[in-house]
Image (tube, grey):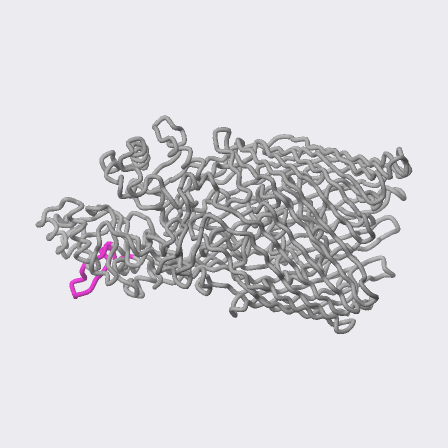
Amino acid sequence: MKLNTYFKASSAPAVLGLALLAQPALAQDVAAEDEETVGAPAPAAAIVVTGSRITNPNLELASPVSVVSSEDLELAQTNVAEEFLRELPSAVPSVGSAVNNGNGGSSFVNLRGVGSNRNLVLLDGRRFTPADTTGRVDLNNIPLAIIERTEILTGGASTTYGADAIGGVVNFVTKTDFEGLEATASQQITEEGDGNVFRADVTIGANFDDGRGNAVLSIGYQNQDPVYQGDRDFSLFNIGSFTGAAGGSSNAIPAVIVGPTPAGFGQLTDDGQGYLDGVFDRPFNFNPFNIFLTPFERFNVYGSANYEVSDNVEVFTQAVFSKNTVSTIIAPGGSFFNTYQVNLNNPFMPDALANAFCDGLGLTAAECTAGRNTQFGATLADGSANPDYVEISTSVRRRTPEAGSRTSDFTTTLFNLVGGLRGDITDSIGWEVSGSYGESERIQRQGGFARFDRLQQSLIAIPDGAGGVQCFDTSGGCAPINLFGPFGDLGSQEAIDYVFNLTQQVITQASLTQAQAVIDGDLGFGISATPISFAVGAEYRKYTATRLSDEASQTPGAVVGGGGAAPDIDGSYNVKDVFAEVAIPVIEDSFVRELTLEAGGRYSDYSTAGSEFTWKVGGTLTPIDGITYRGNYQRSSRAPNIGELFTPVTTGLSNLAVDPCAGTNPVGNAALTAVCVSQIVAGGATQAFAQSRIGNILQPAAGQINVTSGGNPNVGVETATTWTVGAIIEPLYNLSLTIDYFNIKVEDAITTPTVDDLVGGCYNNPSAANPFCSLIVRSAATGGLDGSPNEVPGLLLSLSNLGTIETDGIDVSLNYRTDITDDIGFRFNTYGTWTNRNLFQATPTSINRECVSYYSVNCGSIQPEFVFNTRATFSFYDEFDVSLAWRYLDGVEFEPLQRAQSGDAFVGTLPEGTGPVAGQEVDFNTIPAESYFDLSLRWAATENFEFIVTVQNLLDNKPTIVGSDIGSTAYNSGNIYPSTYDALGRRYAAAVKLRF
């Protein structure tokens, strides 16, 4: 059924004008694919741009390219590109809508699991405006309404597209020569009644001047509501991965004290009046405040136009504008792990805690009484020193829900402009000259965080002489905060506002300037009947990026509970390229059906990293009709990005659940004790105090530790060898099978060590001579690896070119289409990946770590060994479709190397205190295989109206619980891995499309 009619040409001038006039002020020909599922090979008649500059439609080139059609996205009710890319069998989930704490406001793709900075994202074969200092593209800005199909090449493509294309290329191909009007509106909601998503798009296009020109304009809006972890049974209570008990943070209510008490730590009683020295048994359950789905709002505009100014010259232009806001919501803040000065006569301090401080400091009874009862601060009324005044250096870890949650709103404004000319030199040789420019600006605004200087000022509180309490230093409107109070007693609203009402702002800007000239076609002659095809060209690119932070954001420790500082960054680089490709049909219709050879090379000159030459060779062989063998070998490269070159060294957060120096573990082990003590001394403590911490060090709060890292201006280009070999088998009409082996090895990789590289490297052989041990610096106050970033460096993770990454595996696809009767059609597609290995070695002396089928703090996002996506669709009378999608994920387990280091994760019955899941039998060391089913119904009611209804996660599968601190915070959240396994549950989506 033909579902669109032609739009009158009289509307074209308006559309053309809007497309051609799109300017930066806004910030204040490929054939349609016939296949409909990931893994569908491009038909031989298509001009496939991904993976080659050669556009000869008669050549089937060697690089395997899979395709996701716009129809697939409509059936799946996909709203953002990251949603379907993270589910590709060839990809590993990266940062996206399922990442909350660790989401920087952008979404990325990670092909083959070699890093989101090692693949390219293109729009119509051209690089797109980067999101930040890493040069990566934010997928939130891709206008899906205008996308005809998405082509995914996994493997090296640096010869074709330049640096960064090591893991592969994602090329979004827009609709060309679009005519008519298309309006779509959709709504999605979970069965629990949350996570509402609304999206609307309007696209209008027309040909004009007797078909010599075409113009398209598309406008879209999307709004997405959050899903809170507290609204799902499996994530309501935080659960310790290694204890199975109710877990959480030592930044708690009532407050946890780490400081000079006889035991070195303890926790206040629930009423805030007592103190239990040596006891910490009530961690703060932060889960209910965190989210599984980040709020998201987007406005986007797309315009394009092309016009044949003569028989041999066409002008084309394209403009993209996007403004979106991603919000993250994490648990309320507090005083966290900073070291504060607290006066003994603070009226809010309970007597039991004051007495414990007196005992820990060795004060006499008289000194304690005098210090407790003095009515003055450090100075008396006459300005002289107060001899009775006692001030304690301690960590008062008090969570502050009274001040609300911590929020970060990331607002991105982006434009990307393209313009150029193309034409014919001869009947078989064409040319194209184009240029593009794009800018993005991401503004992060933080709220709900305490400022250290104000919190410290408000902690030095004394009697006001009228039965109340006041700050000793009342400047700036200071009001005293009560970190010792039970829930609901944090102090006055004035105190809460004084400490928590300031906001922080970080502005990240990036730009990309490109110019390109290409000549391509065929020579008119060749070895066989088909002429030799070629492409030659030159390219210039300039990247710039800056990060500008307010004073508090760039000062370590100034924003309490804000992680690491965000110092200013300002950098740029440019690259000049020349490249050439050739495809030579060697044999046709002889003793073999067809043999074609390919080769290409690119010379790149970087302003920061010198010159580099990349190249490729490949070919296809069709011995008989119905089977084609293909293979290619490439040398690819990636230049260091602006962040890797110019980011200052700072202390931030990583993850570790089990600290070898915590608790009683080092007691009685002389070698381990000596190393732990030396690392505390390295943090600034005396030998005697460091020795006193042994046996009293707490495990990392919420499984988070400090790490210190940054850019390195001396890193150079990393190189990779990638090769594939495979076959396309077509035994029957409308049946095709592809199988391809891939192999990627990255050398001189720009990397930092993993947490266990240092922790395991040191504590498996603890000694002063072990170089790994000198790269760990502990808190001088607590002996732990957590604390304020200006006090505790933690693990020193240097960036270098010493890493290697290796991965290999097999991709398979099967596509079939047939007519069962004259009125019933059937389509079946499946695409799968078996990943044999994914090894990472940060330095020659580090562990060569395997992460396929494993999860841990070292492996980040999960990469199962087997992943398959399958869709079967029945069509009735060309009006009604019933489509079932099946996604299979192989089982995974706790990483063996980390398991040997930290011990087994919890196995057994979840105890009381873990909420609705209490009593369940669990094994946090494994996640079994998972299958997800989605059911879609499409009804073409008339030629102009179409309805789609989709049920996602049809069987309402619940994710497997593994606890909250077995992996990294970004991907192991709410006791599960929400980027890999569905945390939202069954949900319903409906869409209506109007076309004229």
On-image quarter of the C terminus: bottom right
Residue 420: x and y, percent? 76, 48
Q: Is residue 728 visible?
A: yes
Above-or-below relation of 865 to 840: below
Foreground residue among 128 and 62: 62
Residue most toward the left? 366
- Left or right of residue 627: residue 924: left
For residue 477, which quarter of the picture?
bottom left
Q: Which residues are magenta?
A: 460-475
Above-or-below relation of 753 to 377: above
Residue 576: x and y, percent? 68, 36
Above-or-below relation of 532 to 15: above
User: Does the stretch in magenta take in 473?
Assistant: yes
Foreground residue among 982 and 750: 982
For residue 154, which quarter of the picture?
top right
Q: Is residue 447 visible?
A: no
User: Does the stretch in magenta take in 465?
Assistant: yes
- Left or right of residue 947: residue 364: left
How many marks on residues? 0
Foreground residue among 480 and 822: 822
Above-or-below relation of 831 to 749: below
On-image quarter of the N terminus: bottom right
Foreground residue among 630 and 626: 626
Residue 148: x and y, percent? 73, 57
* Residue at screen point 16% across, 52% down: 355
Residue most toward the top? 769
- Left or right of residue 476: residue 240: right
Residue 401: x and y, percent? 35, 62
For residue 639, which quarter of the picture?
top right
